[in-house]
Amino acid sequence: MAQIRTLKPNVTQQEAFRTFSGGLSAALWRVRTGPLRRIADAYVPYWLYRVRYSMGAARLTRFFALDAVDGSLDLFEFPGMPAENEFLSLDTRNHPRPALDESRAAELLREKVLRVIFLQGFFKLRDTALEIRREPGELYLPYWLGFYGSNNVFRCRVMDAVRRRMEGAKASVFFEQWLARPGGLAA
């Protein structure tokens, strides 16, 4: 077991269970993949970055977090540096290890941040010069995983426990690949 520093989840286990087991979306999952077998919490390591750039006449600073496993998950954006009271420490094995090379992380972050900025009005962007600085340490973000299936074949459905939303196929694949490796999710 390792102690990690994670953002506090905004979804309880009971709320996650209700989401995974009720409603039209859950019914469709049950029809496609089988019944809900269990749910589990999991935590993904993220690196936090301070990004500065010019938009029109304004000089902006934003905080983004990129998953430190392979950079494939959606960026998290924070309005400022998360405060200490937004975190908790816990002992768990339910997390993948950071495996992303720092230079690849910077490259992926730049691409993803530019995509976010362009969606918000790229015509206002003076230049594509981004000042990117990684903040020290890592933080973990909580997720709820719902396991559906039968006959030792399962599919994983993912809920972001901070933003209170169901994730798509990209997150399902991320967690299924992690779980398929030796030492995945703890029982």
Image: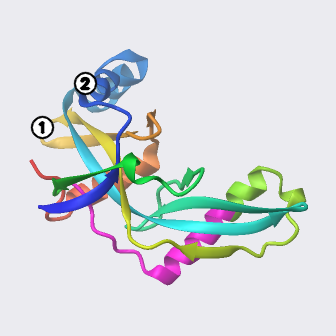
Pick whichever of labels 2 and 1 is earlier in the sequence. 2
Which portion, as a residue range, is magenta? 94-113
Using residue 48 as the reference point, say whether residue 173 is left or right of it.
left
Question: Mark 1 falls on what kind of element?
Answer: loop
Q: Residue furthest bottom?
A: 103
Q: Nearer the viewer, residue 95 or 1?
A: 1
Residue located 38% across and 39% down the image: 161
Queried whether the magenta region covers residue 167, the answer comes back as no
**Residue at left 28%, top 41%?**
155
Q: Residue 24 placed where, x, y %?
A: 42, 17
Callout 1 crowding tier (Cα within 10 Å): few <14, some 14–19, many ≥20: few
Q: Amino acid at mark 1?
A: Asn
- Please name the amino acid that badge 2 sits on: Gln
Relative placement, left or right, of 82 versus 128 is left
* Residue 114 quadrant: bottom right
x then y, percent, for residue 80: 58, 54
Q: What residue is disc 1 on?
A: 151
Determine which residue is flagged by label 2: 14
Q: Percent position (x, y) of residue 83?
A: 45, 52
User: Residue at horizontal 44%, vertical 45%?
Assistant: 169
Q: CA distance from mark 2 to mark 1?
A: 26 Å
- Seen at 44% across and 35% down, the residue is 166
Considering the image in quadrants, where does the N terminus appear? bottom left
